[in-house]
Amino acid sequence: MKIHFKFITPILLIATSNTHALNDAQYMQQAIKLAQHNPIFPFSAIIVDNKTGKILCTGLNDIDSSHNPTHHGEIVAISNCSKKYPKLKWSQTTIYTTGEPCPMCEGGVMYAGISKVVYGTSMPWLLKRGYQQSKIRAKTLAESTPFYHGKVVGGVLQEKTNALFAKNNNLRVHKL
Ligand SMILES: [Zn+2]
Protein backbone atom coordinates (compact mmCIF):
# COMPACT_ATOMS: atom_id res chain seq x y z
CA MET A 1 0.00 0.00 0.00
CA LYS A 2 1.28 3.43 -0.92
CA ILE A 3 1.22 6.06 1.84
CA HIS A 4 0.90 9.63 0.66
CA PHE A 5 2.95 11.65 3.11
CA LYS A 6 2.10 14.95 1.50
CA PHE A 7 -1.23 14.75 3.32
CA ILE A 8 0.47 14.51 6.69
CA THR A 9 2.38 17.78 6.63
CA PRO A 10 -0.56 20.11 7.41
CA ILE A 11 -0.98 18.47 10.81
CA LEU A 12 2.25 20.12 11.91
CA LEU A 13 0.64 23.49 11.33
CA ILE A 14 -2.00 22.79 13.97
CA ALA A 15 0.66 22.85 16.70
CA THR A 16 -0.19 25.06 19.62
CA SER A 17 2.30 27.31 21.32
CA ASN A 18 2.92 28.58 24.83
CA THR A 19 1.01 25.71 26.40
CA HIS A 20 2.43 24.90 29.80
CA ALA A 21 0.11 22.05 30.74
CA LEU A 22 -0.18 19.69 27.79
CA ASN A 23 -3.72 18.77 26.92
CA ASP A 24 -3.46 15.01 26.43
CA ALA A 25 -6.82 14.68 24.69
CA GLN A 26 -5.98 17.43 22.22
CA TYR A 27 -2.75 15.75 21.12
CA MET A 28 -4.33 12.31 21.03
CA GLN A 29 -6.92 13.74 18.69
CA GLN A 30 -4.08 14.84 16.40
CA ALA A 31 -2.57 11.36 16.56
CA ILE A 32 -5.94 9.86 15.61
CA LYS A 33 -6.18 12.17 12.59
CA LEU A 34 -2.72 11.12 11.49
CA ALA A 35 -3.45 7.40 12.01
CA GLN A 36 -6.33 7.61 9.56
CA HIS A 37 -3.74 7.91 6.78
CA ASN A 38 -2.84 4.27 7.32
CA PRO A 39 -6.11 2.32 7.13
CA ILE A 40 -4.41 -1.05 7.63
CA PHE A 41 -2.25 -0.25 10.66
CA PRO A 42 -3.59 2.94 12.28
CA PHE A 43 -0.66 3.33 14.64
CA SER A 44 0.66 6.88 14.79
CA ALA A 45 2.75 8.97 17.16
CA ILE A 46 3.28 12.64 17.87
CA ILE A 47 6.19 14.11 19.83
CA VAL A 48 5.46 17.32 21.71
CA ASP A 49 7.70 19.85 23.45
CA ASN A 50 6.65 19.86 27.13
CA LYS A 51 7.41 23.56 27.60
CA THR A 52 5.93 25.14 24.50
CA GLY A 53 3.32 22.53 23.59
CA LYS A 54 4.61 22.58 20.03
CA ILE A 55 4.25 19.41 17.96
CA LEU A 56 7.84 18.69 16.97
CA CYS A 57 7.46 15.56 14.85
CA THR A 58 4.99 12.95 13.81
CA GLY A 59 5.29 9.33 12.78
CA LEU A 60 2.95 6.94 11.06
CA ASN A 61 3.39 3.19 10.84
CA ASP A 62 4.74 2.70 7.32
CA ILE A 63 6.01 -0.87 7.35
CA ASP A 64 4.05 -1.56 4.16
CA SER A 65 5.54 1.26 2.12
CA SER A 66 9.03 1.35 3.64
CA HIS A 67 9.43 -2.45 3.81
CA ASN A 68 11.13 -1.82 7.13
CA PRO A 69 9.55 -3.97 9.88
CA THR A 70 10.79 -1.61 12.59
CA HIS A 71 8.86 1.35 11.20
CA HIS A 72 6.18 1.51 13.85
CA GLY A 73 4.69 4.96 14.46
CA GLU A 74 6.81 5.72 17.53
CA ILE A 75 10.07 4.69 15.85
CA VAL A 76 9.26 6.78 12.77
CA ALA A 77 8.45 9.80 14.97
CA ILE A 78 11.69 9.41 16.96
CA SER A 79 13.64 9.04 13.73
CA ASN A 80 12.00 12.14 12.23
CA CYS A 81 12.77 14.17 15.35
CA SER A 82 16.39 12.99 15.37
CA LYS A 83 16.85 14.29 11.84
CA LYS A 84 14.94 17.52 12.35
CA TYR A 85 16.31 18.44 15.79
CA PRO A 86 19.82 16.98 16.24
CA LYS A 87 20.19 18.67 19.63
CA LEU A 88 16.71 17.94 20.91
CA LYS A 89 16.33 17.63 24.68
CA TRP A 90 14.32 14.44 24.67
CA SER A 91 13.72 14.66 28.41
CA GLN A 92 11.54 17.71 27.70
CA THR A 93 9.25 15.89 25.31
CA THR A 94 6.13 13.72 25.50
CA ILE A 95 5.07 11.14 22.93
CA TYR A 96 1.41 10.49 22.12
CA THR A 97 0.55 7.25 20.40
CA THR A 98 -2.74 5.67 19.34
CA GLY A 99 -1.72 2.21 20.59
CA GLU A 100 0.29 1.13 23.62
CA PRO A 101 3.96 0.94 22.59
CA CYS A 102 5.34 -2.52 21.86
CA PRO A 103 8.65 -3.44 23.59
CA MET A 104 10.64 -2.19 20.59
CA CYS A 105 8.95 1.20 20.62
CA GLU A 106 8.97 1.55 24.39
CA GLY A 107 12.67 0.67 24.19
CA GLY A 108 13.15 3.49 21.70
CA VAL A 109 11.28 5.88 23.98
CA MET A 110 13.45 4.88 26.95
CA TYR A 111 16.76 5.08 25.11
CA ALA A 112 15.78 8.49 23.73
CA GLY A 113 14.84 9.56 27.27
CA ILE A 114 11.36 10.85 26.40
CA SER A 115 9.74 11.97 29.65
CA LYS A 116 6.28 10.53 29.12
CA VAL A 117 4.29 8.18 26.91
CA VAL A 118 0.55 8.74 26.49
CA TYR A 119 -1.36 6.05 24.61
CA GLY A 120 -4.96 5.33 23.71
CA THR A 121 -5.65 1.65 23.05
CA SER A 122 -4.11 -0.95 25.35
CA MET A 123 -2.08 -4.02 24.39
CA PRO A 124 -4.65 -6.50 25.80
CA TRP A 125 -7.35 -4.87 23.66
CA LEU A 126 -5.19 -5.21 20.53
CA LEU A 127 -4.17 -8.78 21.39
CA LYS A 128 -7.80 -9.84 21.75
CA ARG A 129 -8.47 -8.62 18.23
CA GLY A 130 -5.56 -10.44 16.65
CA TYR A 131 -3.03 -7.66 16.35
CA GLN A 132 0.58 -8.76 16.70
CA GLN A 133 1.38 -7.49 20.15
CA SER A 134 3.53 -8.48 23.09
CA LYS A 135 2.21 -9.27 26.55
CA ILE A 136 4.96 -7.14 28.09
CA ARG A 137 3.16 -3.93 28.96
CA ALA A 138 4.88 -0.59 28.30
CA LYS A 139 4.57 0.45 31.93
CA THR A 140 6.07 -2.83 33.14
CA LEU A 141 9.01 -2.41 30.78
CA ALA A 142 9.53 1.22 31.86
CA GLU A 143 9.42 0.30 35.54
CA SER A 144 11.87 -2.56 34.95
CA THR A 145 14.48 -0.26 33.44
CA PRO A 146 16.79 1.33 36.04
CA PHE A 147 18.09 4.15 33.84
CA TYR A 148 14.65 5.32 32.76
CA HIS A 149 12.43 7.47 34.93
CA GLY A 150 9.66 8.48 32.54
CA LYS A 151 5.94 7.94 32.89
CA VAL A 152 3.46 5.82 30.97
CA VAL A 153 -0.18 6.89 30.86
CA GLY A 154 -2.82 4.86 29.02
CA GLY A 155 -6.44 5.02 28.02
CA VAL A 156 -6.55 8.61 26.72
CA LEU A 157 -9.46 8.88 24.25
CA GLN A 158 -9.47 5.08 24.14
CA GLU A 159 -13.07 4.97 22.92
CA LYS A 160 -11.90 6.79 19.80
CA THR A 161 -8.63 4.90 19.32
CA ASN A 162 -10.37 1.56 19.94
CA ALA A 163 -12.91 2.49 17.29
CA LEU A 164 -10.08 3.30 14.92
CA PHE A 165 -8.51 -0.14 15.36
CA ALA A 166 -11.87 -1.93 15.30
CA LYS A 167 -12.88 -0.14 12.13
CA ASN A 168 -9.69 -1.20 10.41
CA ASN A 169 -9.64 -4.71 11.80
CA ASN A 170 -11.52 -6.22 8.88
CA LEU A 171 -9.18 -4.58 6.36
CA ARG A 172 -6.14 -5.90 8.19
CA VAL A 173 -7.44 -9.44 8.66
CA HIS A 174 -8.44 -9.53 4.99
CA LYS A 175 -4.94 -8.43 3.97
CA LEU A 176 -3.15 -10.97 6.17
ZN1 LIG B 1 6.05 -0.68 18.16
Image (tube, rainbow, N blue to C red):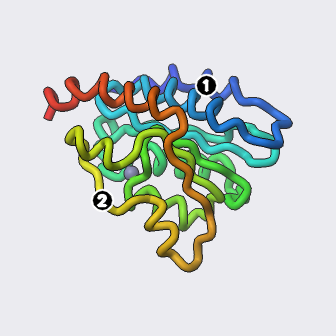
Say left or right for 28 vs 105.
right
> Which of the 4 quarters of the picture holds residue 131?
top left
Q: Is mark 2 within 8 Å of ligand 1?
A: no
**Residue positioned 32% across, 42% down in the render:** 125
Q: Nearer the viewer, residue 62 or 116?
A: 116
Residue type indicated by callout 2: Lys
Above or below for 125 versus 142:
above
Say left or right for 49 vs 46.
right
> Which of the 4 quarters of the picture holds residue 66?
top left
Q: Position of residue 86 (x, y in %)?
A: 68, 56
| Mark 2 surroundings within 10 Å by alpha-carbon count, few (fewer than 14), some (14 through 19), many (20 or more) | few
| Mark 1 surroundings within 10 Å by alpha-carbon count, few (fewer than 14), some (14 through 19), many (20 or more) | some
Q: Position of residue 35 (x, y in %)?
A: 44, 29
Above or below for 116 versus 16:
below
Residue type indicated by callout 1: Ile
Q: CA distance from mark 2 to mark 1?
A: 32 Å
Q: Label 2: state its secondary structure.
A: loop
> Which of the 4 quarters of the picture holds residue 121?
top left
The residue pinned by badge 2 equals 135
Q: Is residue 1 visible?
A: no
Q: Which mark is residue 11?
A: 1
**Residue positioned 61% across, 40% down in the render:** 57
Q: Position of residue 83 (x, y in %)?
A: 60, 50
- Label located before the other in sequence (2 or 1): 1
Q: Nearer the viewer, residue 53 or 158?
A: 158
Quarter that holds the C terminus: top left
Q: Mark 2 or mark 1: which is in front?
A: 2
Task: Check the image and name the residue furthest to the right.
Answer: 18
**Residue positioned 58% across, 25% down in the render:** 9
Above or below for 164 versus 176:
above
